[in-house]
Amino acid sequence: MLTGARFGTRDIKRAVAFYDAVTAEIGAARVIERHGMAGYRGADGGIFLVGTPREGDATVGNGSQVMWAAPSRAAVDRAHAKALELGGMCEGAPGPRGSPETNMYAAYFRDPDGNKVMVMRVGD
């Protein structure tokens, strides 16, 4: 159902440096670069955008988050560690989530603008 998502940023250069490094840990890459915006795509084809708003200031949505699929549990660990290394804030260390039947492994962080991201792997 979901084909894309976007976060606003107050500093596009900082956001691009952050997301270039973090998305690389889960096998994604920057595929769009325009004035004030960058877009990232992983193997599944959906797109994640980050950019400066056309009007007003970028703000963080209360209760909003983007969820990314990772190719492995190790990739979840690496993405979370890279986010923290680059100034992100931990919102939940990597580990099992939910009931054992779901076999979900996830981590949560906020980017330097305060936007929340969950990186997850279902399965081993």
Image: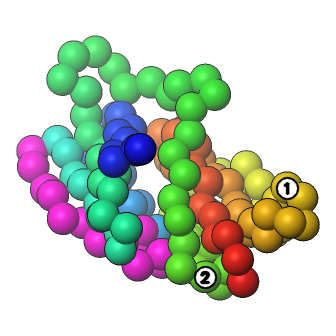
- Residue 28 belongs to the span the image colors magenta: yes
Q: Which mark is residue 98?
A: 1
Q: Which mark is residue 72?
A: 2
Is tag 1's residue or tag 2's residue first in the polypeptide sequence? Answer: 2
Residue sticking out furthest to the top: 56
The quadrant of the image that shows the N terminus is top left
Q: How is the image coloured?
A: rainbow
**Which quadrant of the view contains residue 52?**
top left
Disc 2 element: loop
Residue found 39% across the figure and 61% down from its top: 19
User: Considering only vertical position in the picture, is 29 above or below 65?
Assistant: below
Regarding residue 83, the answer to whether it shows in the image is: no
Disc 1 element: loop
**In this picture, which residue range is highlighted in magenta?**
23-35
Amino acid found under the numbered disc labelled 2: Ser
User: Considering only vertical position in the picture, is 65 above or below 59?
Assistant: below
Instruction: Give left or right: position of 18 versus 73.
Output: left
